[in-house]
Image (tube, helix red, strand yellow):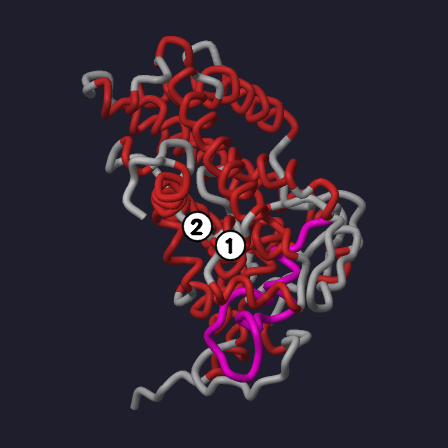
Amino acid sequence: MISLRSREAFEKEEAERLAPFAVRSLESKGRLVPEPEHPYRTAFQRDRDRVVHSRAFRRLQYKTQVFVHHEGDHYRNRLTHTLEGAQIARTMARSLRLNEDLCEAIALAHDLGHTPFGHAGERVLARLLADEGGFDHNRQSLRVVDWIEERYPEFRGLNLSEETREGMCKHGCDWDHPVALPRLGLQRHLESQVADISDEIAYINHDLDDGLNAGVLALEALADEPLWRTVSDQVEARSSRAHVKVHAAQTIVALINRLVGDVLEASHAVLLERKVDSADVARQSEEPLIRFSDEVARQVLALKRFLSENFYHHPRVMRMTRKAEWIVGDLYRVFSDDPLLLPRRIRDRFRDEPPARVTADYLAGMTDRFAMAEHRKLLDPHAPA
């Protein structure tokens, strides 16, 4: 007879299946506001579902990765980037016998606080809030799940588990947080390290893919990059008659496989060498334990430099970057000069928090198209009020 799988059954399965250094949901340190456990979902499954159902998650579909949404239907946006990173994180977690649900929850939540227009918007807010502690999209993502989302009567935010919040929290951000921050060791747990490196693998590959499809990057120039050349030659040996676009797409696939496989092999070797036997031991390592091999790390760094020089600073991309900086900067200054232009629900928060931080929350939550529409409405004299 087939029976329902309860939360307890999932927790028992984790105890049997996961590696000693994995984080188990049964051992979670809990939530900021205690809640009854769910009958059919573990703590981290519940975190993942809360992220997916949040308003901030839905808005990611209209936030820039590199190309703004109106430049084409097939380019990645912040949501598709997030989904690709989460898929890579699940694959690596499964192979390393880490907690897949925790990895996925972190990967899905890590960009919830990203500004419109990608890093261009983030740079503007960081500069404008320099005297207020600055701005960082990682800390803003934690602020979204801890404070800004409004879905529950008992608490603000999503009330995620300590472990998911730990995975989202990074060292080095100075501005105040409205609730107690997760307690961090020298490193964060291995699941968060997997989510971080999965994010890196995802953006390198899909930015290469988008750059090639847009005609901004040239295959001939990429051929000088050792990592690309290696996997491209392997693809060529398997299917020499493939159309150039199919060859490029298959090279991207091979590159993802190459990087994921390298991380798995290198990380597994380090975990064995260091005799890591618990999540807490992993947290006390002086350096991350989820990593590329030294050779591949050098090749990845070279590929990232190539992207910076040939893609992120390409005139086509930079033109939109400059426009994005003007839009976000103008909106911040307009709202700061005349807060009455802000929605009442935003102004009401001035009673409890600094206006600059509340205004940054409002701007960071905007999608590209909403920010452009607001800019046009407020600053274009010919636009309808």
Residue sitting at x 59%, y 66%: 349
Q: Position of residue 319 (x, y in %)?
A: 42, 21
From the viewer's perspective, is 288 left or right of 241? right
Q: Which residue is mark 1?
A: 362
| Label ID, residue 217 | none
Residue type at mark 1? Tyr
User: Is residue 27 positioned above or below 77 on the image?
Assistant: below
Q: Nearer the viewer, residue 214 or 174?
A: 174
Q: Which residues are magenta?
A: 145-171
Mark 2 and mark 1: Cα distance apart in space: 7 Å
- Label 1 neighbourhood size at 10 Å, few (<14), some (14-19), many (20+)? some
The reply to whether residue 63 is in sight is: no
Label 2 crowd (10 A; few <14 / some 14-19 / many >=20): many
**Picture coordinates of residue 264 (x, y %)?**
55, 43
* Secondary structure beneath label 2: loop
Q: Residue 164: horizontal and vertical position, in percent?
A: 59, 63
Q: Secondary structure at mark 1?
A: helix
How many labels were placed on the picture?
Answer: 2
Residue type, label 2:
Met
Q: Residue at x 52, y 43 (%)?
A: 334
Q: Is residue 25 above or below residue 164?
A: below
Q: Which residue is mark 2?
A: 366
Residue at the image point whose x is 52% and y is 21% from the top: 308
* Horizontal arrangement in the rendering, residue 319 relative to residue 111 (left or right): left
